[in-house]
Every structure is written in C-alpha cells, then in structure tokens.
Image (cartoon, helix red, strand yellow):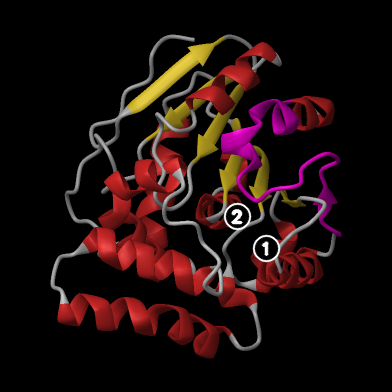
Amino acid sequence: MASLRHPALHVVCMGSGPPLLLLHGAGEDSSMLAPQAQAMVESGFTAITYDRRGTGRSSRDAWPSGGVRQHVEDVADLIRSIPDQRARVVGFSSGGVLALALACSYPELVVEAIAWEPAALGVLPNADDLHQGLMAPVEAHLEAHPADWDGAYDVMLMAISNGKADLDDPLVAVMRRNAEAAVRDDSQITRHRFQSELLAAAPAVVAVGEAPSEVHAAIVDRLGELIGRPAWTVTGADDHEIYLKRPEVLAAAIRGRS
C-alpha cells in the first residue's frame, strides 16, 4: 500500500496485506507504537499508525475542542484514503474509546474494532464521581502551576494508579513529551458516553488481559453488557501496556482472529 496522507495528521504506513490501523493511548504517539506496528507487519498486516491530533507531529488546529468526535472524524478520513476504504482498527486504552466510537459512527469503514482495555470511564454507573476524583488533583496542580503539563501528567498517573505509578520508569519519561495532549485529551475522551443501541450494533469487540486492574475490569464488564458480547481475554497478556512491552503477544492474538 502506498503511503497514506492526511492534511492534519502525521501518518506512518508499513508492510503489506490487510490494513490494520493502530490508535495510541494517552501520552503515546506513533513512534511508541512502532514495535507493535512491526509485529503486526510480521503477522501479515499493513500496519498504519499516526499521531492523534494535538499529539507529536500532528496538527493542533481546532484541538482539543472537538473531543471524541474530532478524533473519530480524523480516523474516518484516514480510512477513506485506503483503497478499500475499510480497515481493522485496534485502539489501546483511551485509543480504545476512539475505536469503539468509530465503529458506532462509521461501521461501514470498520472490519472489526478491537478496544484493548479501553479507558471508558463514562460507561460506569459512578462515572461522574470517578472522573472528578481522578481529575480534581490534576486541575488543582494546574491551577497552582499553570502550564506545567509534565507535573500534571505525573499527578494524573498517580491518581489513576492509586499512588502506585513509578514516575522514574523510562517509559513514563518518554510519555511526558506528550504530557499536555494526554491531560487535555483524556479529560474529554475518558468521560465519553456511548449510545447503547449503536454500540450493540457496532462491529466491535473489547479485549482484556489476564490480570486487568479493578477499574479496567469494571469497564470491560460493563461494555460487554452494552455490546451484548463478552470480552475477549487475550492469553498471555498480563499487563495493560502489553502493546508497548511485548508487542508480539497482541500481534499473534489479532492474527488469530483474522
């Protein structure tokens, strides 16, 4: 497949075979998904990655005011530039929310949307309280330290992990380069609410590891109820960030579904 272009997005396309589009999570970008993309290529796919609007080398035009809808339109436009105008889509964490939203809005563009442990707090019964509890310390930090996005990102990681995040982890250091995008995007993406009838009709599946966190497990269970299909448990996936640490695990699993 020839290189794909989008007026607002930095896009990387590699390999041959059926198109598979990867949607990164908070703090990530296309360069961080390069090993996962390569593993997908070795599994027989054309792997497409890109920096979400507002992240990395992509445009910040009209960002982040458009929220989930803006990101979905970006992905839809990108898929329309593929010759067949259809693709399998895999979204990781908050990217999983976008994958599901895409499948709801444009099912004709999606072969299958796989949402890996999506950060879809909006589907939980206590969504507003949970989201407020996570974001309140982040907002307080930014009020005290305006534009300190690195610090706000660290606060967000600690809130999400109940204080267990290793802020000295080299992976966290890499993610800080996208700290502003992570904080500003995910404050909108994670609270997204789905229309149950669209989600039930969407060509989508929720994927989960063998040892998800309590919050991810609750989200996955609720999404399974809304979709009407149980989550797909990926054998050997023992870490939320398996796609960054051992990309061959998901590559083999997804190849087995095609």
Q: Residue at x 73, y 73 (%)?
A: 218
Distance from the alpha carbon under mark 1 to that under mark 2:
7 Å
Callout 1, which amino acid? Leu
Residue 116 magenta: no
Residue at x 76% of width, y 47% of height: 238
Amino acid identity at mark 2: Leu
Of all residues, the one furthest to the front in this rendering is 168
Instruction: Residue at 60% x, 55% y: name it.
Output: 100
Q: Is residue 35 left or right of residue 253?
A: left
The foreground one among 245 and 227 is 245
Check residue 100 in the rendering and tell me which mark sits there, or answer none: 2
Number of numbered labels in the structure image? 2
Q: Is residue 115 above or below residue 82?
A: below
Residue 250 magenta-drawn? yes
Residue 137: % across, % down: 36, 82
Give the quadrant of residue 213.
Answer: bottom right
| Residue drawn at x 24%, y 34% as measured from the top left | 57
Q: Which residues are the magenta region?
A: 230-251
Horizontal and vertical percent for residue 251? 70, 27
Q: Nearer the viewer, residue 11 or 226?
A: 11
In this picture, residue 216 sits left or right of residue 193: right
Using the image, determine if residue 15 lies above or below residue 161: above
What number is the disc on residue 199? 1
User: What secondary structure is marked by label 2?
Assistant: helix
Q: Is residue 110 visible?
A: no
Q: Quadrant of the C terminus?
A: top right
Residue placed furthest toward the left: 146
Q: Between tags 1 and 2, which lies in front?
A: 2
Considering only order in the chain, which callout, 2 or 1, is on the residue closer to the N terminus?
2
Instruction: Tell me whether the residue at label 1 lies in contact with that at label 2, contact meaning CB atoms closer than 8 angstroms.
Output: yes
Residue 98 appears left or right of 247: left
From where the camera sits, is residue 173 visible?
yes
